[in-house]
Image (spheres, helix red, strand yellow):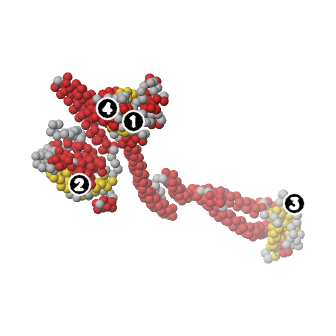
């Protein structure tokens, strides 16, 4: 039955219908055949009996008159009945009065039944005997032999009819199958096509069309229902997938950006290292190679003045003084520049630094100037910062030095304060000196920017630039709050010391 | 005390800068003894002079060497190392006279057995002063070994 499972529904329907109709026809044919087989002998014998009676009645007179000729003529009328093979008319004593034999048959004698009554079935033949009576008296008998040709013909006719009906029923079955196929198999095929399309195109928005209200219809409903769910899930999945892809793209872009940034940073670092190395080289060149020719100029102008003073007039000596002075200023400028550049290149690693100790060092360094000016210096308790001690000393020394340098007629008063902030310390160095016009409060931190003529105050204008560079290297800010004649208040922030344990330890020293 | 100093002292100035050569010579001229000063302008010339080779055959053996560190061709440190590794030259005092005051330069010079290290002052007066002190100390104050070893060659 495997083949049946694998054929299409259309074929299955056709096969079922044909099988069913053929079986029905076969059963009907068989029934008719059996009925015919059963009823035929009886019908035949009845027919033969009535035929024998008719022929016997006609032959009665001939028997009475022993008229062989008339009896033979009467019997010959049986030619019209082709299935009669033989016929014999008997006298009362059983002897044959007349005889009829069908043309193609050989002469034979019938085995006469007793009393001329009875039927005798033999293979291929049936013998029927009837008495012939006139009134109540039996005068003789008649015997007929019939072959079964009629039965064969009938059966043949039955067979032919059955075959024709079978053919017609097959055609009808094909027609019915086609109709049924349209009704049953077509919706299924449509459904199958939709399923195939969906599975190939992944388009879950398609729907099967419901044509019927039967099981296929409910299957279509269930299928469409399922499709709706799949579509919902699919669209949710697509959305999630889209989100994921977007995320992946974002991440990729982020990673690429980060890599680019890192690469840029690495390049910047290399560039910075190179520019640092260049600065170092510049510092060396400035300290040695630039100083060398300057030294020559100053030395020989001085030697000139020294050796030839008696021969030179005052103007010549004055010119030499200008030359020597210019060279010395240039030497100072170069030294300052060198110092400025070293803030970045020669800086030490940051460590907790006790500002109290820093200030003490500075006060010691400036002791002479403090004593000479009679300055009064007050201070808060200074806390620990995270920084470079050498640079912090330089920072405080520059600011205190400025406070001493730019003093007014009053006795200098300097106040150093320190206030903790969130993660930094706010320092201030406040004086009562000449102060600074607020419009210059930015400019004073620029390298070599000076507000005073060279005659009034010494210096190249590097001190505050170095202060700014030191504070910024520590991640802090420096600014000034001042008015002309009101004294200056320099404020700056520095990071708090990171190691608190060490901080307390140092504080207790 | 001045017995050994009947003859004028000889000083070898190893200095590449001709301006400095002249200044140092001028400074020595103004000193008390005004020693004779010869000049070598680079490391090779200095060693040729000391070993009395090439153009310097027959020159007098110096009593004091004034050595600059930054020299072309052959560095002052190499010259110092060669002088101090030669048994005949190593007893000549070497005064390193360099514009550098870098601790690295100072310690490396002493490590190579320099006899003293004097930073070349930028100012003329200070330079003359420094030369005067060098002359006073090395030519007057200290007793130098007899140049007897030189007579052997």
Same subunit, tags 1 and 2 = no
The reply to whether dot 2 and dot 3 touch (C-beta < 8 Å) is: no
Same subunit, tags 4 and 3 = yes
Please state the chain letter of the residue tagged with numbered disc 2 in the rendered image: A
Please state the chain letter of the residue tagged with numbered disc 4 in the rendered image: A
Where residue A106 is drawn, which disc sits there?
A: 3
- Of helix, strand and loop, which one carries label 3? loop
Measuring from the top left, give residue A199's x and y in whole percent.
51, 54
| N-term-proximal mark, 2 vs 3 | 3
Which residue sits at x=42%, y=56%? A240
Distance from disc 4 to disc 2, alpha carbons, whole Å, reads 43 Å
Which residue sits at x=83%, y=73%? A116
Q: Which residue is mark 4?
A: A292
Distance from disc 2 to disc 3, alpha carbons, whole Å, reads 156 Å
Where residue A426 is drawn, which disc sits there?
A: 2
Same subunit, tags 4 and 2 = yes
Same subunit, tags 1 and 4 = no
Please state the chain letter of the residue tagged with numbered disc 3 in the rendered image: A
Q: Which residue is mark 1?
A: B144
Distance from disc 1 to disc 2, alpha carbons, whole Å, reads 63 Å
């Amino acid at each position: 039955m495997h083949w049946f499972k694998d054929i299409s529904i259309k074929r299955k329907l056709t096969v079922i219908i044909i099988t069913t109709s053929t079986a029905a026809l076969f059963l009907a044919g068989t029934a008719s055949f059996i009925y015919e087989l059963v009823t035929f002998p009886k019908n035949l014998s009845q027919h033969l009996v009535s035929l024998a009676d008719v022929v016997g009645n006609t032959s009665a007179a001939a028997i009475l008159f022993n008229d062989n000729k008339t009896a033979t003529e009467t019997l010959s009328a049986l030619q019209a009945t082709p299935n009669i093979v033989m016929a014999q008319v008997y006298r009362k004593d059983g002897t044959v009065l007349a005889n009829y034999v069908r043309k193609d048959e050989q002469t034979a004698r019938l085995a006469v039944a007793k009393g001329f009554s009875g039927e005798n079935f033999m293979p291929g033949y049936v013998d029927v005997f009837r008495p012939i009576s006139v009134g109540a008296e039996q005068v003789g008998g008649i015997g007929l032999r019939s072959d079964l040709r009629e039965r064969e013909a009938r059966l043949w006719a039955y067979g032919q009819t059955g075959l024709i009906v079978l053919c017609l029923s097959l055609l009808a079955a094909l027609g019915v199958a086609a109709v049924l196929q349209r009704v049953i198999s077509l919706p299924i095929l449509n459904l199958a096509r939709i399923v195939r399309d969906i599975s190939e195109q992944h388009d879950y928005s398609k729907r099967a069309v419901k044509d019927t209200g039967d099981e296929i219809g409910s299957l279509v409903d269930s299928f469409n229902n399922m499709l709706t769910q799949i579509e919902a899930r699919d669209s949710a999945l697509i959305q999630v997938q889209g989100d994921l892809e977007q995320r992946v793209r974002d991440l990729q872009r982020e990673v690429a950006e980060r890599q680019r940034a890192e690469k840029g940073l690495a390049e910047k670092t290399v560039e910075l290292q190179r520019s640092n190395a260049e600065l170092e080289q510049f510092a060396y060149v400035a300290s040695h190679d630039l100083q060398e020719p300057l030294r020559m100029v100053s030395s020989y102008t001085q030697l000139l003045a020294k050796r030839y003073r008696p021969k030179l007039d005052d103007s010549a000596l004055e010119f030499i003084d200008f030359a020597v002075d210019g060279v010395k200023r240039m030497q100072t400028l170069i030294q300052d520049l060198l110092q400025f550049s070293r803030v970045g290149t020669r800086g030490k690693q940051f460590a907790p630094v006790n500002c109290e100790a820093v200030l003490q060092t500075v006060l010691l360094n400036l002791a002479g100037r403090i004593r000479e000016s009679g300055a009064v210096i007050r201070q808060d308790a200074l806390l620990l910062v995270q920084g470079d001690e050498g640079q912090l000393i330089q920072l405080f020394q520059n600011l205190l030095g400025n406070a001493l340098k730019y003093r007014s007629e009053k006795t200098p008063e300097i106040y150093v304060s320190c206030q903790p902030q969130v993660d930094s310390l706010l320092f201030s160095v406040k004086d009562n000196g000449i102060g600074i016009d607020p419009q210059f409060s930015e400019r004073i931190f620029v390298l070599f920017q000076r507000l005073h003529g060279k005659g009034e105050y010494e210096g190249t204008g590097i001190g505050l630039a170095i202060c700014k560079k030191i504070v910024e290297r520590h991640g802090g800010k420096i600014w000034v709050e001042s008015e002309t004649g009101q004294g200056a208040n320099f404020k700056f922030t520095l990071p708090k010391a990171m190691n608190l344990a060490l901080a307390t330890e140092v504080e207790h020293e | 005390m001045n017995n050994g100093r009947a003859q004028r002292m000889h000083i070898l100035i190893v200095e590449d800068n001709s301006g400095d050569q002249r200044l140092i010579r001028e400074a020595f001229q103004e000193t008390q003894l005004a020693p004779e000063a010869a000049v070598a302008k680079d490391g090779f010339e200095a060693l040729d002079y000391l070993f009395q080779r090439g153009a310097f055959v027959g020159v007098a053996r110096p009593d004091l060497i004034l050595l600059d560190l930054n020299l072309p061709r052959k560095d002052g440190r190499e010259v110092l190392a060669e002088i101090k590794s030669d048994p005949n030259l190593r007893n000549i005092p070497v005064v390193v006279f360099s514009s550098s005051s870098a601790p690295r330069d100072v310690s490396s010079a002493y490590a190579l057995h320099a006899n003293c290290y004097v930073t070349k002052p930028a100012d003329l007066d200070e330079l003359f002063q420094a030369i005067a002190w060098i002359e006073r100390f090395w030519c007057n104050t200290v007793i130098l070994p007899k140049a007897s070893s030189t007579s052997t060659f």
